[in-house]
Image: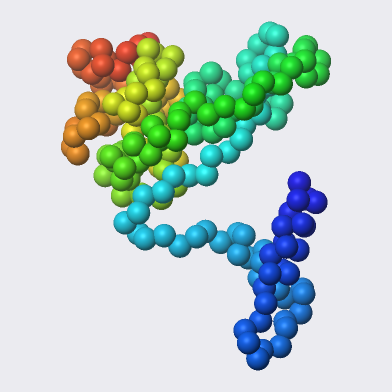
Amino acid sequence: MGATLEATITKLTEQMKPATGQRWDSFEHRAADALLGLCEQRETNAETPTLAPRPVLQVSAPLHGPAEIAGIPIADSLLEQLRANATIEPVLVDDDGVPLAIGKRFSVLSPKVVRAVLLRDGGCRYANCQTRRGLEVHHLRPRSWGGSDDVSGLVAVCARHHRMLVPHGAWALVGNPNQPDGLQLTHLDDLGPEQAAQLGRPPPRAP
């Protein structure tokens, strides 16, 4: 990875030619400018919604026990929330963590479906949030509760609020996402019968 970064910086630096009649800046200064350029986010229209970058997650699936990322066991609910917004590379490992097989990288949601959700919502659908950049896709009804990957069951939310929603969090967006005001933010303990039926299979309430 370090060699790739160095090669990229070198290539960008060599492409930084001075304006006509101007002297060449030092290689070090141009390299610093190239690095800053890589770190800066591209300017976009404030009215243009954008998705968060899609990370590549290498998920280790042991013969026994929970899945792991970088050696850290993760809950199924968290993995489910990550799956819609990342490229997954499954790795089957033995009891000592030695890889036995590496599966093909895949994205759960197609780019076509993600674009449709983004164009419909235009921003975070969590209550009154106005965030329009760095959005993620959320399953209104989690897959483990019987949900699907249809556009009608997906909404765009910001990363901060995504962590608060089911199945990992205690809040749910219920209603019709195709209507501008069709979703209602509800705590799992306050779900009505119709909302609970739409959501699927929420966890049991705490005693």
Q: Nearer the viewer, residue 62 or 120?
A: 120
106 lies above or below 19: above
Quarter occupied by the C terminus: top left
Q: Is residue 34 left or right of residue 198?
A: right
Q: Is residue 147 left or right of residue 94?
A: left
Q: Residue at x 39, y 13 (%)?
A: 145
Seen at 34% across and 36% down, the residue is: 117
Q: Quadrant of residue 111?
A: top left
The residue that appears at 67% across and 16% down in the rendered structure is 61
- Residue drawn at x 53%, y 29% as measured from the top left: 107
Q: Residue furthest front?
A: 20
Query: As displayed, is residue 197 above or below residue 136?
Result: above
Give the percent coordinates (x, y) of residue 157. Answer: 37, 39
Left or right: 174 with respect to 60? left
Residue 81 is left or right of residue 129, and the answer is right
Q: Is residue 129 above or below residue 202?
A: below
Where is residue 76? Give x, y as percent.
53, 18
Q: Is residue 102 visible?
A: yes
